[in-house]
């Protein structure tokens, strides 16, 4: 077959625009500028700053030069800032970060639900640095150099920025970064490693996501490294998602919340900021106000982060969780705490009538803590019940889906009593929100 030469189309040169003024921050913490009646978003810029920018595919633009600094600007302490995609608000003072997050939640509630709370809660906030007790590191194997890169994804890229330090990681986890990279590069499994998760619960845990079986030589080197560390445990997540400790004698990790210890399996969801998790559970209990006669429904219950504390004050708790392994761990945590008024079940909360048990009775109060996709389907099913709960406490990790779900509750006759942010991830644009709805 004849082949004909076809020249590649010429790329248009990117347009550079001078003296643009940043008017605001968008919901992802990027500066907003306007050119020819179109909005563009520029990272690492702040309102009031004049900049030169290179226009990319709308609505993206890249900072070329900054002519002046906002009074809210600070020097980012992280040497990887600007390359690493992890912390995108280090250039903004911590107080201004929290004001911005408050404003984002308020704007999204107004935009999607035409709603504002009766009372804005004071933001729950903690340490701005060394707060992360959990992080996931990406891996890339370079075949030609036969070298593993371990780190975080670069901004707007699949590239990986290799880390030797991280100022938002808790000190015990950050200290592992250089040694861990050296260790993994000595192993055969480095070529097929999926990712690495670091946890502090309370001692450091390294979870290796494997895509192939571990050979004995690698296992011996991992055991040798583990024994040389102080209180570090290695766990392996195999290609079939089974999770097991490298050393059979390693106990399940645990964390403490509300004066109770909760065990979990590495890979299960736990909050990354343990200090603020305690404050969040406390506020949830204050808003839900469980009474001895209350029957409580909990959705997206996990391994019992809120469950045990609610059950200690209520008549009963039905805890629904989508992951069967976490449901079983919740039951074990309840037994270990000596709490007998918790019923736990696994169900797909994104399907219709995920829990037939709901039809067998009514619930006085509800607490839900969904993933970023929110709880639209779960709330739709909940609102079909003939006896609706009087109070709903919603813990959200995505303000846009929270605002969407708040509209659903408002249309069903619920009033938004309290709302406020939880600054679970300082130095980033990510926002946790808590809200309390009351039936009227």
Image (tube, rainbow, N blue to C red):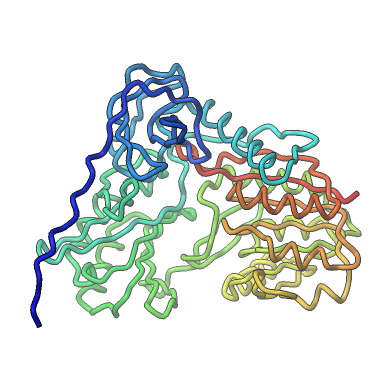
126 left or right, relative to 214: right
Splitting the image into 4 quarters, where does residue 311 fall? bottom right
Q: Which residue occupies the foreground of this view, 337 or 323? A: 323
Q: Is residue 415 left or right of residue 213?
A: right
Q: Considering the image in quadrants, where does the N terminus appear?
A: bottom left
Residue 293 vertical position relative to residue 330 in the rendered view, above or below: above
Q: Give how far across and how far down residue 191 sits, in percent.
A: 21, 69
> Could you tell me residue 225's position as x and y percent?
26, 62
Residue at left offset 29%, top offset 34%: 54
Front-most of 87 and 296? 87
Residue at the extreme bottom: 1
Q: Is residue 318 above or below residue 103?
A: below
The residue depicted at 47 percent of the width and 41 percent of the height is 131
**192 sits left or right of 242 in the view:** left
Residue 72: image location, x then y, percent: 46, 21
Residue 122 position, x and y percent, is 68, 32
Vertical position of residue 33 compared to residue 422: above or below: above
Residue in the image at 71% along x and 65% along y: 378
- The image quadrant that residue 89 belongs to is top left
Q: Using the rendered view, name the quadrant where residue 87 is placed.
A: top left
Above or below 202: residue 361: below
Q: How many numbered tags mark residues here?
A: 0
User: Could you tell me which residue is drawn at 59 percent across and 37 percent down?
Assistant: 104
Left or right: residue 412 compared with residue 203? right
């Amino acid at each position: 077959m004849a082949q004909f030469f076809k020249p590649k189309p010429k790329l248009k040169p990117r347009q550079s625009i001078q003296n643009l003024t940043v008017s605001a921050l968008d919901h992802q913490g990027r500066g907003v500028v306007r050119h020819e009646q179109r909005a563009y978003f520029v990272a690492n810029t702040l309102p009031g700053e004049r900049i030169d920018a290179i226009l990319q595919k709308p609505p993206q633009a890249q900072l070329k030069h900054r002519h002046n600094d906002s009074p809210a600007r600070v020097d980012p302490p992280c040497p990887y800032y600007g390359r690493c995609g992890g912390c995108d608000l280090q250039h903004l003072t911590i107080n201004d970060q929290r004001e911005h997050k408050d404003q984002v939640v308020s704007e999204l509630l107004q935009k999607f639900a035409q709603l504002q709370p009766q009372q804005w809660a004071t933001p729950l906030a903690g340490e701005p640095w060394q707060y992360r007790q959990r992080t996931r590191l990406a891996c890339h194997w370079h075949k030609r150099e036969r070298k593993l890169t371990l780190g975080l994804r670069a901004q707007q890229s699949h590239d990986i920025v290799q880390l030797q330090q991280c100022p938002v990681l808790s000190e015990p986890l950050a200290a592992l970064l250089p040694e861990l990279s050296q260790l993994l590069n000595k192993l055969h499994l480095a070529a097929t490693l999926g990712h690495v998760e670091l946890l502090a619960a309370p001692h450091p845990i390294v979870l290796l996501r494997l895509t192939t079986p571990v050979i004995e030589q690698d296992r011996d080197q991992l055991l040798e490294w583990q024994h040389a560390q102080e209180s570090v445990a290695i766990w392996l997540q195999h290609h079939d998602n089974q999770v097991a400790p490298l050393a059979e004698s390693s106990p399940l990790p645990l964390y403490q919340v509300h004066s109770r210890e909760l065990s979990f399996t590495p890979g299960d969801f736990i909050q990354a900021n343990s200090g603020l998790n305690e404050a969040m559970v406390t506020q949830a209990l204050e808003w839900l106000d469980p009474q001895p006669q209350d029957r409580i429904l909990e959705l997206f219950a996990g391994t019992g982060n809120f469950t045990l504390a609610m059950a200690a004050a209520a008549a009963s708790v039905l805890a629904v969780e989508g992951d069967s392994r976490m449901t079983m761990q919740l039951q074990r945590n309840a037994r270990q705490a000596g709490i007998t008024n918790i019923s736990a079940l696994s169900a797909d909360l994104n399907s219709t009538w995920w829990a037939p048990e709901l039809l067998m009775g009514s619930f006085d109060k509800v607490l839900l803590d969904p993933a970023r996709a929110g709880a639209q389907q779960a709330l739709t099913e909940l609102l079909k019940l003939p006896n609706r709960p009087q109070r709903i406490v919603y813990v959200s990790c995505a303000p846009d889906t929270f605002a969407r779900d708040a509209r659903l509750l408002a249309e069903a006759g619920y009033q938004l009593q309290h709302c406020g942010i939880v600054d679970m991830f300082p130095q980033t644009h990510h926002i946790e929100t808590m809200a309390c709805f009351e039936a009227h």
